[in-house]
Image (cartoon, grey):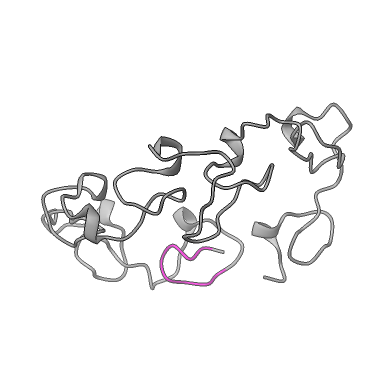
Amino acid sequence: MCGFFNTTTVGHQAKDCTKSESVCYNCNQEGHLSKDCTEPRAEKTCYKCNQPGHLSRDCPDAETSGPACYNCGKSGHISRNCPESSYGGNYSSGGKSCYSCGGYGHMSRDCPSGQSNQKCYNCGNFGHISRECTQPQQDKVCYKCQESGHISRDCPQA
């Protein structure tokens, strides 16, 4: 699905979208992209506080902009850099958990249990992921419609 230009068109990427609803992020006019805009470049604003002059990662208003860390729920850092990180810790601010071990406070790529809990989507075995699988590549199965031959982002039924 495109979605990039506020459309729900399936079957192409945003960069290839030909919908007339495309809106320039510079002048907010329809019909062109900001890279092709003839208007003077607008000063970019922070996504957190809507103020010009800095990016969201440098926002001085970070404490009022809501939680960013999945581990402790505080602003100013992400979970892998959390000073309060404790693998398998008691996280109660949103329920995000590791896809490998189910624990809280880390993501699967940082899982302290190693790769033994990773499941291969090609062969179904644990201990490796599909790009490392030595078995012949199986047909892709769509998670949306359960049919083979395509993946969910290319699903004709979406």
Q: Is residue 154 left or right of residue 19?
A: right
The quadrant of the picture occupied by the N terminus is bottom right
Coordinates of residue 148 in the picture (x, y in percent): 84, 56
Coordinates of residue 127 in the picture (x, y in percent): 79, 31
What is the chief secondary structure element of the magenta stretch? loop
Residue 12 on the magenta segment: no
Q: Quadrant of residue 4?
A: bottom left
Q: Residue at left 51%, top 63%?
A: 2
Q: Is residue 34 left or right of residue 72?
A: left
Q: Residue at left 80%, top 49%?
A: 140
Q: Point out the stretch of residues depicted in magenta.
A: 2-9
Q: Is residue 89 left or right of residue 135?
A: left
* Relative to 20, residue 36 above or below: above
Which of 67 and 148 lies nearest the eye of the viewer? 67
Coordinates of residue 138 in the picture (x, y in percent): 87, 42
The quadrant of the picture occupied by the C terminus is bottom right
Q: Is residue 77 left or right of residue 15?
A: left
Q: Quadrant of residue 117?
A: top right
Which of 127 and 1 lies nearest the eye of the viewer? 127
* Relative to 147, residue 59 above or below: above
* Relative to 76, residue 126 above or below: above
Q: Quadrant of residue 50?
A: bottom left
Coordinates of residue 16 in the picture (x, y in percent): 48, 56
